Image: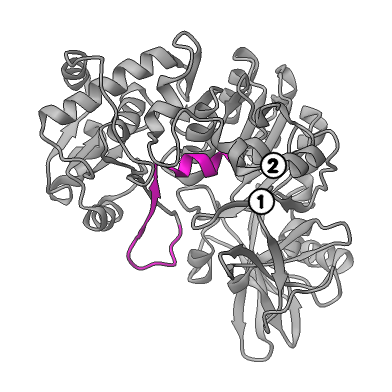
Amino acid sequence: MRSITDITGYHEALASFSKEQLWALFDGNRSDLNIGHECIDRHPPDRLAVHIIDSKGHDERYTFGELRIWSNRFANYLTTLEVARGSPIAIMLEPSLAFYASLFGSMKAGCIAVPMFTLFGPEGMRLRLDDCAPKLFLGSASNVKPLGEVVGRQHVVVDDDFMAILAAQSSDYDLSTSADDMAVYQYTSGTTRQLPEAIEHRHRAIVTVILAALYGTGVRPHDHLCCPSSPAWGHGLWHGTLAPLAMGASVSSYRGKFDPLRLFEALEQSAINNLSAAATHYRMLRQCPRSKEFRHSIEKLSFTGEPIDSETASWVADHFGQPACSIYGTTEVGVILVSYPGAKDFEVKPEALGKPIPGREVAIIDESGEQTTPGVKGEIVVRRGNDWFKTKDIGYTDEEGYFYHAGRADDVIISAGYTMSAVEIEDVLLQHNDVSEVAVVALPDANRGQIPKAFVVSLRNGDNQFVEELQELARTRLSLHEYPRAVTFVDSLPKLPAGKINRKALREYVPTSTQNSARGT
């Protein structure tokens, strides 16, 4: 029987998929499994594992053999500190040798790796540290010192002296973990929770996430995948790091402030053939004036986090010669809808989320819990045991079984009895040549209940003429009632750490005197 990694066609993937084939990809089994071993130890030691794209141009490369040695050293280092198995280890580091050594070394030692976003401030860190209560906190001097008493526990500044301590540890380590042992605490980037809560992942989670690699990013063992999202977040950690490494693929991560020019350089110089990024990254690539100067080897592209606008999707397909394929899921249930990059028998529809991943049952239900017919909007749900798990996203299907996103349930705008999609309005406004970024939210209105309000980023002056052009564009492309009745021009849109637009902040936005606002009729 062929390995599941040899199957690239959509129809064959559906017909031949089985959980047994999925488990056959790993050394471990349903009883004994370790993510560190599956991602690092079992692959050819001289093969490139991680390539770090540094925003300042100083790239780093590490083989599977090197990561095996350094992660074993970190596991032994934890032993010298008498850190007990099951202890959380907070890791607040940019992609680096120390980051990967501590990430995989923690899991090898039976501890729980807790990646922390390096741009968290003291309050953000305090909430998360209080929640997970780590036995050890690792960070660079620039991250640890400003936190001061927030750390309030055993912490280590990761510098040359620390790496020298690691280098003195044994490079051998005997693994012993259960597939059901806790491996990772993953914090979401959302702002809906007053207090952050970690999503808990056991070692067996690496088996499930391989589905996203096989069908969401299209990774195969000899690929070189680049994911510029931070490995502190779900996309960068699971899709951009753990899943591809578990299959023996090489990965490129990004360190520092994102620069589209640096990414274009890396795509050319490192022969990267698979790119998985946030929609924001693709928009920034599109806006790079030097994009045509570079060659690339891209065969598969994917995006996640939020929908990609049609203008950017068209540019991606034209520039790379491949469509950007959607990956859709939630932190709680993982990836459920994909567009099967690399499958020649799967048509990628530009605005679709794709179709269900093999082994997943996904549907659209209405307020009464009944499944809707094609074209009728409802909530996207996925089968979890005997019940439907609600994603809180609105969507619909078409006659061919493709799923489409129509915004978050709390982002649907109901104005004077009309239901509008913020996503659709945003997509149209981004077609205006002078619009760089846009976000639409519901604004309370005494007469209509709610009205759509657009926040626009543009180099052009935000005058009344500009507002009228945007409103007319939406009216003519969508409908006479579906347009932004209020428009505010801002220098930038607030973003969550994972790159998504912070819509909660926009709903609470108070304009300053230097920012232009206008209101239509």
Q: In which image quadrant can residue 21 be found?
A: top right
Relative depth, front residue between 346 and 315: 346
Name the mark on residue 57: none
Q: Secondary structure at mark 2?
A: loop
Q: Please state which amino acid type lies under the numbered disc 1.
A: Gly
The residue identified by callout 2 is 17
Numbered range of the magenta stretch: 190-210
Q: Around disc 1, counting alpha carbons within 10 Å, would you say few (fewer than 14), some (14 to 19), or many (20 or more)?
A: few
Q: Is residue 271 above or below residue 253?
A: above
Protein image colouring = one colour
Residue annotated with mark 1 = 359
Residue drawn at the location 32% of the way across and 25% of the way down:
101
Placement of the C terminus among the 4 image quadrants: bottom right
Instruction: State the separation of the CA atoms marked 1 and 2.
Output: 8 Å
Callout 2 amino acid:
Phe
Name the residue: 78% across, 49% down: 310
Asked whether disc 1 touches disc 2, contact meaning CB atoms under 8 Å apart, the reply is yes
| Coordinates of residue 275 in the picture (x, y in percent) | 64, 31
Q: Is residue 41 left or right of residue 268?
A: left
Counting residues from the start of the chain, the first of labels 1 and 2 encountered is: 2
Horizontal arrangement in the rendering, residue 251 relative to residue 164 (left or right): right
